[in-house]
Amino acid sequence: MGRNAVFLCRLVVVSLACACQPGHARDYPARPIRLIVAFTPAGATDVLARMIAEGLGRRLGQPVTIENRPGAGGNIGAALAARARPDGYTLLMAPTSIMAIAMTLYRTPGYDLTQDFVPVSTIANVPHVLVADPGLTVTTLGELLARARARPGSIAFASQGIGTVSHLELAMLEQLTGTRFVHVPYKGSAPALLDLLGGRVVAMFDSIASALPQIQAGRLLPLARWHRRCVRLRCRACRPWRSRASRAIARSRGWVSCCRRAHPSR
């Protein structure tokens, strides 16, 4: 693990010890820890969770098991974590969709951020990229938008789920450019990518963690680049564009944090 990951593991250890009842912290942990991921395996949140779980397990001397509970833009997994015992043995990987978007998009998401969780640490910033099926025969964002304007509502555009960052990025793209796509929500990045690679959908916003292997293999074409300070990828297709939409996309990214269950008296 890198130094940043080691530092994050130390933060998690300290926070979990604080979660224990007085007098029990010295014995913590006495059993395995559950780390809930509210999305399918192989996406950015899941990849980061497995990196943290590996290092945390070594430091604590107890296994940290990943439990994937996808659905409802992350709300199903977050609600499960909110019902866990506040003993430090349940953690939640909480991306932007859980920590910010759901609070404004859903009236009753199934949890209360101010009452149910205590933040442990920010894990990572997650830059996004707009990728397309090379079979769509577009090579730039401008060509994709021209195709959408010529045939409104004919381009199937995947997202990681309703209320996720990728869904809001699509909505922002439509609003800024006056285009209309067919939104196809999934329960995470992995199933959306499978359908994108299989030609059932033709474009999506995705995190660089899950899209990069497919980009490097030539199976996906990046149309709008991510922030150059976050990722330095030598790719001819990722050249800068001057439109308002492309500048907004370049600034778009998500982030992932880690939370634990709060004590009821909090």
Image (cartoon, grey):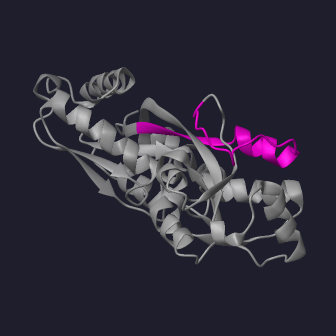
| Above or below, comparing residue 41 to residue 16 in the picture | below
Frontmost residue, 208 versus 74: 208
Q: Does the magenta stretch include residue 161?
A: no
Percent x, y of residue 180: 82, 69
- Quadrant of the image occupied by residue 2: top left
Where is residue 162, by image quadrant?
bottom right
- Give above or below for 103 relative to 167: above
Q: Could one spot residue 92 in this view of the protein?
A: no
Q: What stretch is highlighted in magenta?
A: 230-258
Decide if residue 198 is in sight here: yes
Q: In which quarter of the image is the C terminus?
A: top left
Tally of numbered discs? 0
Residue name at image x 54 percent, y 46 percent: 208
Residue 194 position, x and y percent, is 48, 69
Residue at screen point 56% across, 69% down: 196
Q: Is residue 221 toward the left or the right of residue 219 in the image?
A: right
What quarter of the picture does the N terminus occupy?
A: top left
Residue 166 percent location from the top left of the image: 63, 55
Residue 106's image quarter?
bottom right
The relative height of residue 168 versus residue 236 in the rendered view (above or below) is below
- Left or right of 185, for residue 78: left
Q: Which residue is painted at 27% across and 26% down in the image?
A: 13
Q: In this view, does 37 lie to the left or right of 156?
A: left
At horizontal 66% and vertical 51% (from top left) the residue drawn is 104
